[in-house]
Image (cartoon, grey):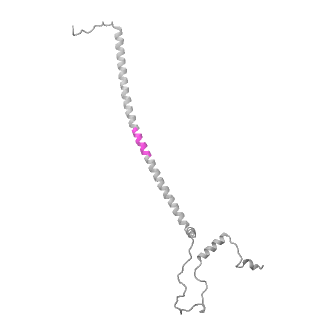
Amino acid sequence: MSPRAATDRRSHVGKNQAQRTRYGKAIQEMDCEPTSEETSPISRPSDATGEELSEPTAKRSRPINWRRRCWDHFSENWISWAVGGFFLAMTYFFVDAKVCNARIEEKLSSIDKSTQELRADVQTTNSEVSSIRIDVEKSKLNIEHLSEAIKKLEGAPPKPFVPLASSSQ
């Protein structure tokens, strides 16, 4: 077996994944046009039959896999996507912060309102307590006067019981 036999076109040589992807990309990027120009007039058929035998002039590229197109797009534009993602995340956080601030302000206003209501209740209760204290003081004075009157009456002789005269007699 000659050393050339190992690389002969009929023998199989394996490729690793990186070589396969480079080969596939190179084939997709290749031009569809022939690589050599035909110069000999013999190889071209004549136009005697009236058929159009010329080669198409449209430059049509080979179809590219959508995964490959996406990968190429992101590998070329990753900075734009990163900046856009950053601004999108910042926008989300700003909106979320505004919503949280609105919730906090709502809670603070409800707490302030309930505090004002409690203050009003405390003032009402204080006025009621002060009126009760005044009534207690008046009652204490009345009790003192009554106790003095009782002490005076205890020292005096008892008055006889006189029934009231009835009007029927």
Q: Is 103 left, or right, of 16 in this rendering? A: left
Q: Compared with residue 59, is residue 41 higher up or lower down, i.e. above or below? A: below
Residue at figure coordinates x 51%, y 63% from the top left: 84
Q: Which residues are magenta?
A: 107-117
Q: Is 158 left, or right, of 36 in this rendering? A: left
Q: Compared with residue 57, is residue 110 higher up or lower down, i.e. above or below? A: above
Q: Residue furthest front?
A: 49
Quarter of the picture holding the C terminus = top left
Residue at figure coordinates x 53%, y 63% from the top left: 83
- Tell me if residue 22 is in the magenta stretch: no
Q: Mainly helix, strand or loop, the magenta region?
A: helix
Quarter of the picture holding the N terminus = bottom right
Residue 70, quarter of the rendered image: bottom right
Residue at figure coordinates x 63%, y 71% from the top left: 21
Residue 166 x/y as whole percent: 23, 9
Residue 124 x/y as whole percent: 37, 33
Residue at figure coordinates x 39%, y 35% from the top left: 121
Of 105 and 151, which appears nearest the observer? 105
Of 134 and 40, which appears nearest the observer? 40
Residue 26, quarter of the rendered image: bottom right
